[in-house]
Amino acid sequence: MTDTDQTTPPQEAEPNKPVALNANDPLGEVWVFCELQEGKVQTVGLELLGAGRQLADKLDRPLAAVVLGHNLGEIPRQLIHHGADKVYKADHPDLAEYRTLPFRRVLCDFMGQQAIPPHSMLLGSTTTGRDLAPRIAAHFQTGLTADTTELDIGPYDHKGGSDASKIGLYENCLYAIRPSFGESLKARILGPWKNPQMATTRPGVMIPLDPDPSRTGEVVDMPVHLQPADFRLTIAETVREATAGVDFDNADVIVAGGYGLANADGFALMKELADCFENGTVGASRKAVDLGWIPYVHQVGQTGKTVRPKIYIACGISGAIQHRVGMQNSGLIIAINKDPDAPIFKFADHGIVGDLYQVVPEMIKQIKSSKGSKEVSSVGV
Amino acid sequence: MTNSAVKDVFVMIKQVPDTRSKAGLNPDGTINRAQAKRMLNPFDEYALQAALNVKKQTGCRVTAITMGPPPAIEILYTALEHGADRCYLLSDRRLAASDTLATAFALWKTIEHLNGFQMIFCGLQTTDGDTAQVGPQLAERLNLPQVTYCEDFEVVGDKLHARRVVEGGWQRVVSELPVMVTVANSYHPLEFKSLRGARMVQELMRNEALRSQYITTVDLDVVGADPDLTGLKGSPTIVAKTDKVGSIGGNCAMHQGQAVEALVREVTLQTNLLEFAS
Ligand SMILES: Cc1cc2nc3c(=O)[nH]c(=O)nc-3n(C[C@H](O)[C@H](O)[C@H](O)COP(=O)(O)OP(=O)(O)OC[C@H]3O[C@@H](n4cnc5c(N)ncnc54)[C@H](O)[C@@H]3O)c2cc1C
């Protein structure tokens, strides 16, 4: 509740309804954790700033980007251009690469020092965000919702439950909305009793703002006081392949190949099918990428790209959850798999049970001949 | 073998509704928990195998721990069949409706109640909650370093050398013990159960005295956990509302049992695939 709300005449409150509680009073800021990879802000952080901007505007509170790294340079300004009112930064050699314990130390120390805890905190559902968020949530014993697909602010009237101290009408709750039970239900998860109300969000779900170079904001340093116990884990080596080079965004059709291709040459067939389309691109499962059959830029899924083509053709891909989250929002999913019980048939729209080495060439043939007939008929007209 | 730094390994496992079989699924794809069959969370199979691999390497003792209603003992039998040495079932009505934080609290108390450990393995996530949060929340309570998304590892002296998945590739890390590890589903699949284990479990199911040597059931009082900090009361989040979302999944038009030409023809006729041809 804000001060102005308190001037609301009491008679406007509905009878039998308790007055709004002050759990959120005074309202804290909205914090967005912006993760870096090799010194660059990851898109998911910019997407979360876009989502966080809307939450902050509804709450009428500042939006703060939180960034930890080394030699941050222009990054704070970039975050302000993407919607942050404030940037909390920690710039330190020991933070050059993400590690759970040092990041957790800096963030928990800093958050613990705030007179008013942040209202909410958003992180990406990445291997970093999902590693860090539960640590912070457990440290402050606050609520955390994983893999949200929508976020909003609104009231919540908690009527029952075994704990009388929780009953009440809560204003300005974070609505953390996520799919559940095999994605056929959407659950709205709330935790208004304790701030920050935390959520992680999958990459590719929220929309970043267009950068506005005229935006200004405040940059605040977070103190870094690491302890010996924070160095119990060291990184020996990180290997990442390039992440740019394939244009999935403008592809109408993505033809993706998996372990069922059995060898790298199978991707020539994937390319042949993709080339039958005006805007066709080749995708891949992680297993195919890990085997070196095709570069990482083609990988679709949790640790690859999130894609939404009009048509996704999955060939020899079993449909593991981590692949699914990257392609389930495609307009139409056609799966080709020789195993009728393959999990991908649980969420595909059309399933062809068969050997992809027979099905795909046949598909190429039929598409090519249809093209022929199209041309013939247009000549006829 | 016996002088390894690793003497005790814990593996945290959970029983979930069996979504692989059709029984217990409502027509709209939601779970009918009363009727659903139950199974070991598939992600936990990898965690169990990880613990058993450490046992192979070091000769350590493997303790499987689960929290759930009494039927969850079934997955402890599974763990024993595969080679776990002892099991704990934390079962208490007051745990109902625990969210991940409250679950991690109760498991933390259970672990504290037992003697020390050098490694804790958790599955990556569960198929019914899908959050991947409990492992790191437990690590926070225990003040441990953690390796999440672990695909492969080896105990070298008193250190864990592990490989974890990251965006665009992988990372090799070295951690001190004790450590909490969440095992990715790209780790080695669970091996077949041993004949010896299977026989022993057959015996256990009949013989209560023997069973109690391998499986200990505890409640919140035994492990000394404040009931207000777990269950519904101890959960900072609540599912306030669920909406059905159209028809995601379950409606796949299957094309099979005909000549390939006919199968493909069906798909090109029933979809707009040809519209995008160049
Ligand atoms: C943290 C983490 C992140 C991950 N991120 C990703 C990610 O971003 N993207 C991703 O894809 N995976 C990811 N994975 C891996 C994922 O869990 C699966 O291992 C992977 O998606 C499996 O790839 P696949 O479907 O190609 O192989 P498999 O699961 O082995 O499936 C191969 C399929 O091919 C079928 N098949 C075999 N031969 C034929 C044939 N001749 N014709 C037709 N069908 C055939 C088989 O029936 C089988 O269904 C991740 C895993 C982890 C742990």
Image (cartoon, rainbow, N blue to C red):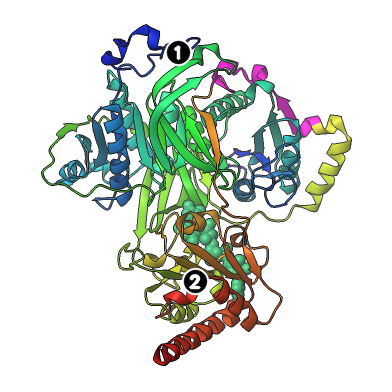
Is the residue at mark 2 from the same chain as the one at mark 1? no
Q: What range of the chain is rendered magenta? A: B212-234
The amino acid on which the numbered mark 2 sits, given as a three-letter code, is Asn
- In the displayed structure, does residue A226 sit left or right of residue A186? left
Instruction: Give the number of the disc on residue B95.
Output: none
Whether residue A136 is visible, yes or no, is: no
Query: Which quadrant holds residue A7?
Result: top left
For label 1, the SS is loop
Q: Residues within 10 Å of mark 1 (few under 14, many from 20)?
A: few
Q: Residue furthest left?
A: A214
Query: Where is mark 2, residue-wise?
Result: B272
**Residue at horizontal 43%, vertical 44%?**
A149
Q: How many marks?
A: 2
- In the displayed structure, does residue A357 sit left or right of residue B84? left
**Residue at horizontal 69%, vertical 48%?**
B27
The amino acid on which the numbered mark 1 sits, given as a three-letter code, is Glu
Is residue A203 shown above or below B104? below
* Chain identifier of the residue bearing label 1 in the image: A
Q: Position of residue B218 (x, y in %)?
A: 70, 24
Instruction: Give the number of the disc on residue A14.
Output: 1
For label 2, the SS is loop
Q: Position of residue A51 (x, y in %)?
A: 32, 41
View quadrant of ligand 1: bottom right
Task: Give the Cα separation between the discs numbered 2 and 1.
Answer: 53 Å
In terms of depth relative to the viewer, which is nearer, B7 or A319? Answer: A319
In terms of depth relative to the viewer, which is nearer, A106 or B2? Answer: A106
Q: Residues within 10 Å of mark 2 (few under 14, many from 20)?
A: few
Is residue B274 shown above or below A190? below
